[in-house]
Image: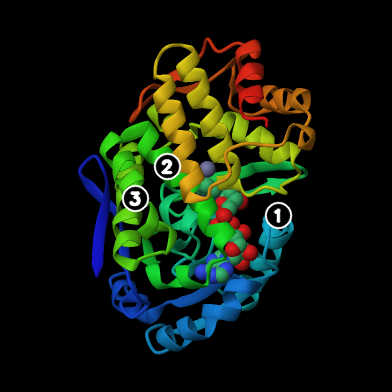
Amino acid sequence: MSTRITLHNDKKSIYDICIESSFDNLPRELGQLDISRRRLCIVSDSAVAGLYLNELEALLTSCAREVISFVFPAGEESKTLDTVRELYEHLILHQFDRKDLLIALGGGVTGDLAGFAAATYLRGIEFVQVPTTLLAQVDSSIGGKTGVDFSSYKNMVGAFHNPSLVYINLSVLSTLSERQYLSGLGEIVKYGLINDPSYYDWISCHIEEIRRRDPGTCEEMISGSCHIKQGIVEEDWKEQGERALLNFGHTLGHAIEKEMKFALLHGECVAIGSMAAAWLSCRRNLISEEDVHALRALFDSLGVPRSLKADEIDPKAVLNAVKHDKKMDAGSIRFILLGRIGQAYIETSVTEKELEDALSAVLD
Ligand SMILES: NC(=O)c1ccc[n+]([C@@H]2O[C@H](COP(=O)([O-])OP(=O)(O)OC[C@H]3O[C@@H](n4cnc5c(N)ncnc54)[C@H](O)[C@@H]3O)[C@@H](O)[C@H]2O)c1
Ligand SMILES: [Zn+2]
């Protein structure tokens, strides 16, 4: 089991995404980056390090000049400039120079943080993504967005910095909690909704295999999502246009995430936000009521939350958060709607009243 997806920019290959069932081929893939004379620093959070750091160190020690590690406490709270500063200090202490390389072993928090450190240390060093959550495997490890949170603002400080390789080991999904796995499915359903009706149908037809994390199904599902993200990113590396379609479900999703004080996971908020955006697309007669029912049924059968309890959240606060969100574009909200299932577009005419109604539609 092995799949390779190469991302291109103007026909030039930029990096590969390798989808594998173990870490066994990682030394060979890193060999392509000529690591024998370079130092490697494996960056990982405390939970992932406990599970996989020893295995990775054992595999890589003989391949590189030196292998060190940097472990930080797991959780979004660590995605800060303070942690980046500690990582810089660690790299300086070990005399890392511009030829050396970081390996981000973990979920989106690790990838974003290590990627940002790589983008800025000595004006930029190479890094490799080894994503270990479903969300990181299909989304955050691909596309070169890196960054950290600042005060209470998510991803406020960041840089575009492409990894040199994304190495996905599907077997690490076996240790991922059910909730984290289902959260990743929120982004996966989004890919089908915005870009590929046949992928959306494929998900609907493989519920049981997806839920039990059947390896073959996971490979097909993850490579399908990676292909969709590849197609969108290759057209718009710096998010100046169509890449914004990936923000489907995120305008309300981010605001809900913030107002729930991160008690809900990112993919859970994306699913709720997707439901609201689908509802609004239906209200504008772009998709049918049956489409909305089918999406609701799909989230339910996958086990992905798609609504909030009305007493859990203050809708006014959510709408205020939307207004302050960085997706506000010169005073108008760039909201992503569905023209049909499998095709999204950017709409700038969505009113506050429509947002309020869409939010009410996902409150029980
Ligand atoms: N850069 C991007 O394009 C992009 C896109 C989407 C999300 N993000 C960012 O990604 C972050 C969320 O990522 P996430 O959901 O992966 O969160 P995360 O990195 O915090 O991982 C979630 C939890 O799962 C644990 N974990 C990771 N892999 C595991 C495994 N295989 N087995 C057991 N436990 C494991 C982690 O220790 C952590 O506690 C957010 O900060 C978000 O802003 C970035
Ligand atoms: Zn997302």
Q: Is residue 266 above or below residue 50?
A: above
Q: Foreground: 296 or 134?
A: 296
Q: Foreground: 29 or 347?
A: 347
Mark 2 surroundings within 10 Å by alpha-carbon count, few (fewer than 14), some (14 through 19), many (20 or more): many
Q: Nearer the viewer, mark 1 or mark 3?
A: 3
Q: Residue at x 72, y 49 (%)?
A: 263
Q: Mark 3 sits on what residue?
A: 226
Q: Mark 2 sits on what residue?
A: 189
Name the side, left or right, on which 194 lies relative to 330: left
Q: Is residue 258 above or below residue 113?
A: above
Label at residue 141: none
The part of the image, by quadrant, that contains residue 338 is: top left
Q: Is label 2 in a helix, a strand or a loop? A: helix
| Disc on the earlier residue, 1 or 3 | 1
- Name the image quarter holding the C terminus: top right
Q: Is label 1 in a helix, a strand or a loop? A: helix
Mark 1 surroundings within 10 Å by alpha-carbon count, few (fewer than 14), some (14 through 19), many (20 or more): some
Q: Mark 1 sits on what residue?
A: 81
Q: Amino acid at mark 1?
A: Leu
Name the side, left or right, on which 101 lies relative to 254: left
Q: Foreground: 352 or 99?
A: 352
Q: Is label 3 in a helix, a strand or a loop? A: helix
Q: Is mark 3 within 8 Å of ligand 1?
A: no
| Disc on the earlier residue, 2 or 1 | 1
The part of the image, by quadrant, that contains residue 95 is: bottom right
Name the side, left or right, on which 41 lies relative to 224: right
The figure's colour scheme reads rainbow
Q: Residue at x 64, y 43 (%)?
A: 157
